[in-house]
Amino acid sequence: MQGHVGQSIPNNGRNPGVPLQADWFDTVAVNTAAAERRAATLTTRRTVKKAWQAAWLVNALRCIDLTTLAGDDTEDRVRRLCAKARRPLADHIMAGLGLDAVHTGGICVYPTMVSTAAKALAGSGIPVVSVATGFPAGLMPLPLRLAEIRYAVEEGADEIDIVITRAHVLDGNWSALYDEIAAMREACGQAHLKAILATGDLKTLRNVYKAAMVAMQAGADFIKTSTGKEGVNATLPVSLVMVRALRDYGERTGARIGFKPAGGIRTAKEAIAWQILMKEELGDAWLRPDLFRLGASSMLADIERQLDHHVTGRYAASSRHALA
Amino acid sequence: MPTVTDILATMDYGPAPEAAGEVEGWLKARGSFGHFIDGAFTKPGESFDVANPATGGHLAKVAQGSGADVEAAVRAARAALPGWSKLTGHERARWLYAIARHIQKRERFLAVLETLDNGKPIRETRDIDVPLVARHFYHHAGWAEMLEEEFPGAKPVGVCGQIIPWNFPLLMLAWKIAPALAAGNTVVLKPAEYTPLTALAFAEICAEIGLPKGVVNIVTGDGSTGAALVASKVDKIAFTGSTEVGRTIRKVTAGTGKKLTLELGGKSPFVVFADADIDAAVEGVVDAIWFNQGQVCCAGSRILVQEAAAESFTRKLKARLCKLRVGDPLDKSTDIGAIVDPIQLTRIRDLVAQGEAEGAVLHQADCQMPTRGCYFAPGFFTNVAPANIVSEVEIFGPVATLTTFRTPDEALELANNTRYGLAASIWSENINLALDIAASVKAGVVWVNSTNIFDAGAGFGGYRESGFGREGGREGMGEYLSLPMPKARPEAVALPLDAAPVPGQPAKGAAPIDRTAKLYVGGAQKRPDGGYSYAVMGKAGELGLAGLGNRKDIRNAVEAAHKAAGWGKATGHNRAQVLYYIAENLAAREAEFAARLKSAGAADPAGEVAAAIRRAFYYAAQADKFDGAVHSTKSAHVTLAMPEAFGVMGIACPNDAPLLGFVSLVLPAIAMGNRVVAIPSQTMPLAATDLYQVFDTSDLPGGVVNIVTGVRDELARTLAQHDDVAAMWYCGSAEGAAMVEAESTGNLKVTWTLANRNWRAAEGQGRAFLLRATQVKNIWIPYGE
């Protein structure tokens, strides 16, 4: 399969979840200053240059959940996004990199756009990701949120990005949080569940750790930082705490949980930073799209520009690249 | 070259070397370096090779400094001193500012050069060393600007000889030169022979900005050059390096009057409580012992983990260890670079092998090692007995020991079970616990939930055999300034003591009932161990007998002083109450004390007693007011500078002013929480022994003040040699002062040899005494949630 690196990697090994166990997290210690220090030095301790940089950017690309979650989304807009997901790089860049096929990790849309996306992506192996459960605030009656999941799955979604009820975290009501996510997991059926913690609303890193652990205990296959609509979205310190929670959960259960930072990630440089985090704190397995996704939209354009420069030696203009 | 497809399969980092062409060109152009003396480079004479430890490759030839070179440099510094010290603070500030700016403009050049010379990763030189260097000069430009206002009356010390180590070559240069210059001193600096190149580049920067010639002189060479500098006519020696060399320097400078600061070795504890953020603590180890290849004097090299967290901590630490990248220091993704020199590598290997032979289990990173150059795979030991060599000796390599503990008490006991006291790192999410340990650990720098954080605004320096003096911040500036010295008064010469009966007329006015002045140990009067007494002679004959104390009495007194540890934990207010009470009881016996002094021939007995009472009031007042500072360092950090008592101090008092001299030395020491073993005036000890009853009635806990009478300099020698006495003041003869300094090297105790003075004048009391009665502990507490 020389040169063909973007084929869909099956999301094997669902997280079966475990009963709610508060002793896994209720006394957790997370030192914010230390987490910030570690996050700040991740990218000063590691870097990638030249061909390695190009490869890491291609890898980021194949982990992107290319996203449109806007009030003005239309079917045509979604189709255009899907076309970009299938062919994210201009031909001369592909040739220059010696690649003959690459696609993004997924397409992320609202439930009403799922069928459009599924049709547009048919045969590509690119999973359709749907947000659900009253995204982004999640403050709808639970039956409606569960119905929304079922709707999205029926429309053809392969993965469901749910939002949690932040109030349950802020109140420390772990059983309510657990039950809610467990019910959502059931509603997902074969579709994978990504739990959006909306970390910007949770404020403290301890809350983030606890919410992450409850979500995993309830059966989340991925944990995801943000909706993109909170005041603060994906940050490296928050991601660090989430991946450590994920690692701890894995050590206890053997389950491999995926991680998806999302919201506010716009540059190629950030794409490298998050990959360094995954490689350092978790390992190479977490650099593959079955365990790592980057929720982003405009980042793709920056990556394409950087890769163009890598291939041609000239700084690129976005106007020469196909719009997402 | 792998293809993008290949790399996508492995997701390796790949090489990311920092370019070194500019620096290599500079080295090639220079070829060999002379010394930088009087603003110009000398023609290199005898030279040695400087190598890149990462490759073994030749970097440059550097001159081996001779005694004559050192002399020339000191002469140049001496000649430059009047001009430099007479500049206004503002003018000096401009020079320091120019240095700081130029370091920033040459930041990458200096970082690359340092990495080539030392072997440390470019990440460290680029992100840590060089920015701290610039910060240090900026910070001290500020001290120069404010000097007169902040240190009124202070003068520069003079010509400073500065000897720095190879582990942070340019940073240590900055720590030495910036405060010296800010204070108006001129310097002769000797960089380490392994790593002289950034100092030479710094000399070029001095020349580039046109710094007045002779203000900064750099003489390169080995230990013999350093020894010549120590022996030269400088006014101060500032040394950073090994404890062994520090000991030698203390010995050699004893009695010379050279001001001395020593920043020496360490075996710093890294204490992880079960309630800590374990992942953070593991990352802390990376920043502690796996920083700069473990060649860090303040490295947290003794990891102490609470048993409840030991399993998970150790597991996570092993996992983290495997992520470290060892290799080319110029590679931007390298964590562990090269050990500085093959000799150091051999030393690390030998110590690690010996540790294993003594039963410790080594866990080492299973990482790819370069095939050439000086490398040692990072790791840590478990199953380490406290008596294992690797528990005691500084390895100065990337290997820590890991020991478990059960309780906070045990953690503290283990933490303090070392001859060193440079730094400590404490990991706990319980702020009460963390601060409790921070207050009790014997270390000059304490990092809570962090490690190896440095800033020019905070003091750095050790307790115990890690040296004395502080670098950085206000504390560090004080080391490069001197206050006007009081006019020394030669004290009365003590006659040889006679332990045999002295037949003759007892002095007039002797008490009708015989009073025996015994020794005062642990709050009780004790007969001298030897069973001898000596006659105390007054104006008109024998005044009485005083105990003739010996070494064992000193030993007993020191033990009693250690038992009175509660005094150091009492509030300043409580200590003040006792001091006021002493004043009160002294006042009640004013006439008695005056009569005693009169019988001894004091000129103004009533005045001396009144001054002693005032002194007690003064130090009572200071007991809860001489306090520390919160330094302005990094954002989201509280950096506390806390003056702490030494613990047990020895004090040898002048023969003159037998009451006031004693009180003037003992009271500031105990006001700060020290317990003292005091040797009163040899000629007139009765003025001090009369105080027993005052102390007893003033609620002074037993053991806080212990008094051993006898031959002062003999007793002082025993005190100076005592390894469990942390500091020693000596006020007496020049020979005695030299002896105390020379004999203090066993545990490198802090000494103060002060001149006898007019104890009634202002120079008889003040903050200067309190500064000498305390050592500053800097506690770093990052915050954020």
Image: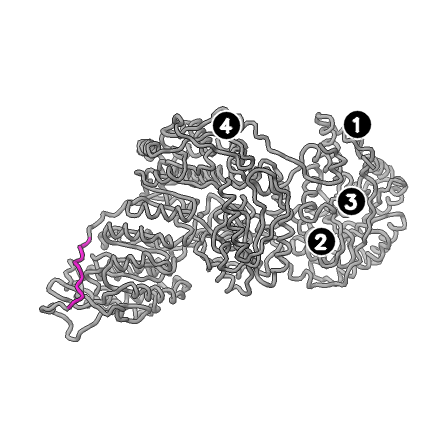
- The amino acid sitting under disc 1 is His
Of residues B283 and B377, which is closer to you in this image?
Answer: B377
Chain under numbered label 3: A
Q: Which mark is residue A246?
A: 2
- Residue named by callout 4: B27
**Label 2, label 4: how far apart the Cα atoms are:** 50 Å
Chain under numbered label 1: A
Quadrant in which the N terminus of chain B appears: top right
Q: Are marks 2 and 4 on the same chain?
A: no
Residue B272, position as x, y percentages in the image: 56, 58
Helix, strand or loop at mark 1: helix
- The amino acid sitting under disc 3 is Pro
Residue B707, position as x, y percentages in the image: 28, 64
- The amino acid sitting under disc 2 is Leu
Q: Which mark is residue A92?
A: 1
Q: Are marks 1 and 4 on the same chain?
A: no
- Residue named by callout 3: A289
Task: State which tag comes first along the sequence, 2 or 1.
Answer: 1
